[in-house]
Amino acid sequence: MAEEEKFTSLENIGEFGLIERLTRDFPLTQGSTIKGIGDDAAILEHLSGRTLVSTDMLVEGVHFDLSYVPPQHLGYKAVVVNLSDIYAMGGRPTQITVNLAISNRFGIEYLDKIYEGIRHACEVYEVDLVGGDTTSSYSGLILSITAIGVADENEIIERSGAKENDLLVVSGDLGGAYMGLQVLEREKQVFQGNPEVQPQLGGNEYVLERQLKPEARKDIPELLAKLEVHPTAMIDISDGLSSEALHLSKQSKLGVAIYEEKIPIDPQVFKLCEEFKLNASTIALNGGEDYELLFTIPIEEHDKIKGNPHLTVIGHMTDANAGTNLITRDGASIPLQAQGWNALRDSKEPS
Amino acid sequence: MAEEEKFTSLENIGEFGLIERLTRDFPLTQGSTIKGIGDDAAILEHLSGRTLVSTDMLVEGVHFDLSYVPPQHLGYKAVVVNLSDIYAMGGRPTQITVNLAISNRFGIEYLDKIYEGIRHACEVYEVDLVGGDTTSSYSGLILSITAIGVADENEIIERSGAKENDLLVVSGDLGGAYMGLQVLEREKQVFQGNPEVQPQLGGNEYVLERQLKPEARKDIPELLAKLEVHPTAMIDISDGLSSEALHLSKQSKLGVAIYEEKIPIDPQVFKLCEEFKLNASTIALNGGEDYELLFTIPIEEHDKIKGNPHLTVIGHMTDANAGTNLITRDGASIPLQAQGWNALRDSKEPS
């Protein structure tokens, strides 16, 4: 479905020429960036507070399918998923580095579009691109990004700080990104069967945007500060609610109870789950890629978030002996399983 | 030539199980590492000075050939080439993150060996492994590493600080890594022709070590400090002397003159160049991967390094109008060309 326009082979431009071209429109805006691209290393100055570092790799065919992911969106999403980790620590992202491996089937114009998306994300989230490496690959496209951020010592929220009886809270809603992927996969199948058929994407805008152009929840730490809510532990939801709740439990050495009926799910996700004959709760628990924030707060702070449209209390932390459970709509208690998407199994299907 | 022993499929271990296994023997030793692996981001504290960040990607088939690169050496080298960039800034590396993409043809035992090499490099260079991502790939093995370091503001040496008449100095000797690659490629051809033949690697230990297990020149900044020598610009030699000298010239807005007869080349490299019918100067200029340091010093400091076995003056910086030239043994002046190995052309042959 990708439109092919101009194609300039990468072999016509040297590695340094390519880096210069791709990174020329990236102004440095962060006070902590002393020097960006152009030397052996970037130079940063994080005078006060602590430096946060997070890194992720996105591999074509495993994490994305270029037959329906536009290159601008790929660049944008690759940055956003890394920044999400910095927000999940209670920090503010300041810089990124981008490593890109590409095969000769991509022209320079295609890379320009990826970097257009990267640049857009840098603008929206106010981070500087300060380094990277560009190399060839024998098969697919691989993006490896490192995000750097800052936080004062007392602002940092680790996974391990939850206390027994803390409330478990999630931002936004879950399952959308996964259902967006299902819609895209379905239309790809249809297209492959008959290239004359135009994809039927109308009415599914919300889930498609959740899949193709997710946002990191930059606004949530700001909102929590404004509400004077003090999360005790936090994580971002990249692999699915179930998997992330298990991380919080394990590292805080506690149990957890999640109430199925409380899990926030958008009506469009419910509708599509019916269409695809999938269980919406399973999708929300195991779908992944929603990049919402999952955190715990002291029960005394419940009043401060009650009724807030961005935040939903979905459960609470329990004694470790109580285990890690989903309490179903009919009151049954089922052990949570980390069936989130496992990048080592080459499959995007949650169980 | 690789020995296959035990093979445990990656599918039998989850992504988190794999990360835990691979990173369990990495103690944190740096005071600046507050928290390593195990949360959304690593937490560092660089209280004084500046933070340096450098990143590189190594792709199977482009940067390395697993038929003759042992996995321990691959892990070691992948770390070292990144640390080299931090030393080239005048800094001290403190942390690394490692992203790894792998196909199912690799067993867990193989990855253990790669991490054995990574761990060995962490011990030798006193850096902490603080983060990373492990994912599957549809074809080869890809390692993407980010190195973080520190330096006081006045210790940092950029590429742009060279002055006219400064001497151009290189550590160690050049061309060895490239000739090591030639020996390995030759033995691979022989082996493919007749698997019964044992590889003839004896007598070539020095160049093989330069290729398979290079070291970053951690000792050179220490030596320069002891000698009270103050480099004005510095870069590490990853793409070849010619390419790196052009970077120094361009960023310092100067010309450069390199004297062919001064370029330090090991006798083993000369001998192999005769055997392979290659010009040793060309190999030293364009071979790359030597990871020596190339730097400029004020001419007044010449006496401090004269006769030092680790350092060789190979030229000097000139007015920009004089251009960037190699002065050959017979006195001819030839423009330097950045014919260093270009990772975008899928070729390891220098011109």
Image (tube, coloured by chain):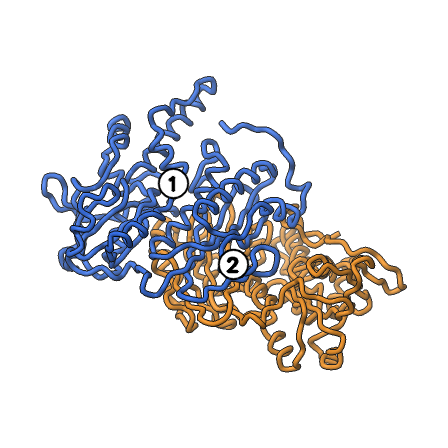
Chain colours: A blue, B orange
Amino acid type of the residue that numbered disc 1 sits on in the rendered structure: Pro
Q: Is residue B130 above or below residue B126?
A: above
Label 1 SS? loop
| Neighbours of disc 2 within 10 Å: few (<14), some (14-19), many (20+) | many
For discs 1 and 2, the disc positioned in front in the rendered view: 2
Say which mark, if any, is on residue A214: 1
- The kind of residue on which mark 2 rests is Thr
Residue to which mark 2 is pinned: A33
Q: Answer yes or no: do the residues labelled 1 and 2 have beta carbons within 8 Å?
A: no
**Which class describes the residues within 10 Å of circle 1: few (<14), some (14-19), or many (20+)?**
many
Q: Quadrant of residue B291?
A: bottom right
Q: CA distance from mark 1 to mark 2?
A: 26 Å
Looking at this view, is B104 or A328 the one in front? Answer: A328
From what the image shows, is residue B226 above or below residue A152? below
Q: Residue furthest top?
A: A196
Q: Residue at x 54, y 72 (%)?
A: B152
**Residue B34's x, y, as percent?**
38, 68
Q: Position of residue A17 (x, y in %)?
A: 66, 47
Q: Residue furthest left?
A: A331
